[in-house]
Amino acid sequence: MLFSYSARDEHGKLVAGKIKAPSKETAVSLLQGRGYVVLSLEEVERKSFFERIFEFLESVKKKDLLVFWRQFGVLLASGVPIDRSLKSLYRQTKNPILKEVLYEIISDVEGGSSLSTAFGKHPHIFSDFFINLLRAAEISGKVEDTVNYIASYLEKEVAFSKKIFNALIYPATVILLFLAVIIVMVLFVFPQLSEFFITSQIKLPWITQFFLKTGEFLLEWGLGVLLILIFGLFFLLNYIRTEEGKAIWSEIQLKLPIFGKIFRRSALLKFCQGVAVLIKGGISLPTAIEMGGKITSNVIYQEIASEIAEGVRRGESFSALVASYPEYFEEITATMIAIGEQTGRLDSLLEKLAKFYEEEIDAVLSTLSELIQPIIIVILGVFVGILIVSILWPIYNLVQSL
């Protein structure tokens, strides 16, 4: 069984996370064994396949969430009470899903629920990262600052996603258009030429035979192939959402040539940025590390972060634990964290690290953007040449035989 908990450690700092245990009593005992005073403990329900699909369809874009948190921060900074701020945001929100969720949050808050509890009822919209920040803010009285932290964090996330999208949109569009051209040629052009080639009684080159056979196969079985591809993609996407699928996909991401480096630095960027924000929000370091791992959306980094968090709870050095995973954390990460521990400025050093990784990713993406266009042009040129040769070669042979 999996339980979600919030507690206070021996220093009085708020900690939150998830723990596996055969029963609720065992979970409480395990947490108390860590020296925690348990504040809340709830079982995390396992979601069915259809529930996961429903949540996916109900997702809200990061841009909409960014606008929501930014406006929420502005209203709180203006001295507007939380309940009135939420009602104002409800009236302004155009996204129907977010609007419905806000209505439920307002009802819960007016019914006496805390802000973090009300938001926590909608994990498919608001992540554990945001909920834990709000929970810590309610205790420390820094709700306004925390809401602005969340808005700034999302702002960086949206900007980073946009950079990735802009870098990939051109090659993706060109490749899709080229595939469309190949399909048209194979399905419509080559079948028309087939009769001409057969009546001419010339020996066809293997490349021409390949395209002719492919066209015949697709004309006969194309609908079946399309259905298999659709269902295959559907089940693949669903498999990637399972625990096993996430782990395999996370490992593949990090081992990809060229792009593996981008995925790894992207994970480090999110980890450093997330841990910095959580520490500033008053979350204890072990919980911040654990949550930082979850923010990366990479199962391998989540597991490593969980192990590092356990080590920090035992009193081990954060930087030394990070240095013990050289394959996943670069040397500069451990060095900067060590300086942060020595100077007591861990949050600001982590923010500088996040900025460093952001600049590194920007540099790699810029280089890729410059190189990928000529590379794609060369590759497409080769394939277009093969298509032209497959048509002209038999025609040339026919002319030669006359």
Image (tube, rainbow, N blue to C red):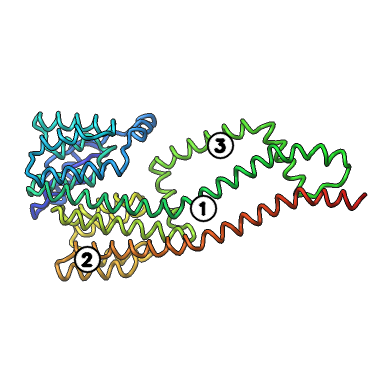
Q: Position of residue 161 (x, y in %)?
A: 36, 51
Residue 229's label in the rendered image is 3
Q: Nearer the viewer, residue 312 or 157?
A: 157
Q: Position of residue 27 (x, y in %)?
A: 20, 41
Which residue is found at the position 11% from the left and 52% from the top? Answer: 13
Q: Nearer the viewer, residue 30 or 307?
A: 307
Labels 2 & 1 near each other (Cβ < 8 A): no
3D distance between C-alphas at marks 2 and 1? 36 Å
Quick check: 348 above or below 79?
below
Q: Quadrant of residue 318?
A: bottom left
Q: Which tag, 2 or 1, sits closer to the chain's start?
A: 1
Q: What amino acid does circle 1 point to?
A: Pro
3D distance between C-alphas at marks 3 and 1? 22 Å
3D distance between C-alphas at marks 2 and 3? 47 Å
Q: Nearer the viewer, residue 347 or 81?
A: 81
The residue identified by callout 1 is 171
Instruction: Please tell me how crowded label 3 is: few (under 14), some (14-19), or many (20+) other residues with Cα within 10 Å.
Output: few
Q: What amino acid does circle 3 point to?
A: Leu
Q: Which tag, 3 or 1, sits closer to the chain's start?
A: 1
Which residue is found at the position 25% from the left and 54% from the top? Answer: 274
Q: In the figure, is residue 172 to the left or right of 116?
A: right
Q: Position of residue 311 (x, y in %)?
A: 23, 59
Label 3 SS: helix
Residue 401's label in the rendered image is none
The residue identified by callout 2 is 349
Q: Position of residue 327 (x, y in %)?
A: 38, 64
Q: In the figure, is residue 165 to the left or right of 275?
A: right
Which residue is found at the position 32% from the left and 41% from the top? Answer: 61
Label 1 SS: helix
Question: If the image is split into quadrants, where does the N terminus sit?
Answer: top left
